[in-house]
Amino acid sequence: MTFLEFKDKMFDLACFNIYQVYAWQPNFDRNNLTRWVKKGYLIRLRQGYFAFPDYRSKPDYPLYFANRIYRPSYISLHTALSFYGMIPEAVVQLTSVTSLKTASFNNDFGEYSYKNVKESLMFGYELKPIADNRTIQFATPEKALLDLLYLYPFYDSEQELEELRLDEDYLHDDLNKDLLMEYCTKFKSKALNHRVKLLFKTYDL
């Protein structure tokens, strides 16, 4: 099989895993993938997952791949807070929440970090449309903030919360505080309740 034949079949998937290749070609020689990665024809996203380098020039695909290479997961934490303009700094890592074990991957599309939560906490995300009729699973602002306070227990004082430098205009004008409290109840965590109260006090909400 030539690479062009392979690309013609797999390109529209954007990223794919080895099992999808075998479903199409049960006798496929896996060594082809190793050779094509070395030649720069493919990018290895993680063990068994690949993408075509053409997608580097397309916006939002690094986020799309975050959803695809470790499932179930959704974009949250610092990446989501930065996207919404709630924290001032640009974020290097692409941060997600998953019910699988904590993991991280590095590839040509970025640094991917996944934090583990219980399956019951896999809620509070929506589907954001991107190009080519694809969607990304992305935390709401309220869930991204709660995920952060829940998974990073050192945000446990007014000083630490101030150092987050959350955008006060966003907190006062755009954050849905009723939804935040509704989500907070679902966590069933006294520690999180305490941090949310501190957050409200620190930012005068």
Image: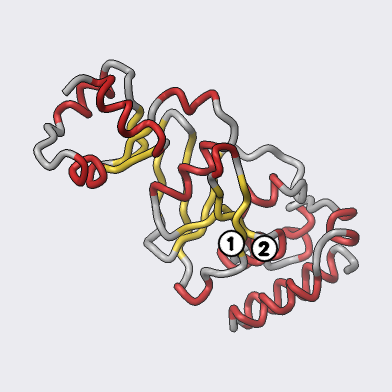
Few, some or many residues within 10 Å of mark 2 (<14, 14–19, 20+): many
Q: Quarter holding the N terminus?
A: top left
Work out whether residue 60 or residue 168 is closer to the camera in this orientation and state it.
60
Say above or below: 121 vs 63: below
Kindly state the secondary structure of the residue where label 2 is placed: loop
Q: Residue furthest left?
A: 27
Compared across the picture, whether 83 is left or right of 55 comes to: right
Work out whether residue 78 or residue 173 is closer to the camera in this orientation and state it.
173
Toward which corner of the image does residue 10 lie, by quadrant?
top left
Check disc 2 and report the residue beneath it: 155
Q: Are marks 1 and 2 in contact (CB under 8 Å)?
A: yes
- Give percent across and percent down for residue 43: 35, 28
Tell me what residue is drawn at x 67 percent, y 77 percent: 184
Tell me what residue is drawn at x 51 percent, y 59 percent: 97
* Count of marks overlaid on the render: 2
Work out whether residue 176 or residue 59 is closer to the camera in this orientation and state it.
59
Few, some or many residues within 10 Å of mark 1 (<14, 14–19, 20+): few
Task: Check disc 2 and give the amino acid type.
Answer: Tyr
Say above or below: 192 vs 15: below
Compared across the picture, whether 77 is left or right of 33 comes to: right
Tell me what residue is drawn at x 79 percent, y 76 percent: 178
Task: Check disc 1 and give the amino acid type.
Answer: Tyr
- Give percent across and percent down for residue 71: 40, 56
Check disc 1 and report the residue beneath it: 152
Tell me what residue is drawn at x 16 percent, y 39 percent: 25
- Give percent across and percent down for residue 153: 59, 66
- Give percent across and percent down for residue 12: 41, 35
Kindly state the secondary structure of the residue where label 1 is placed: loop
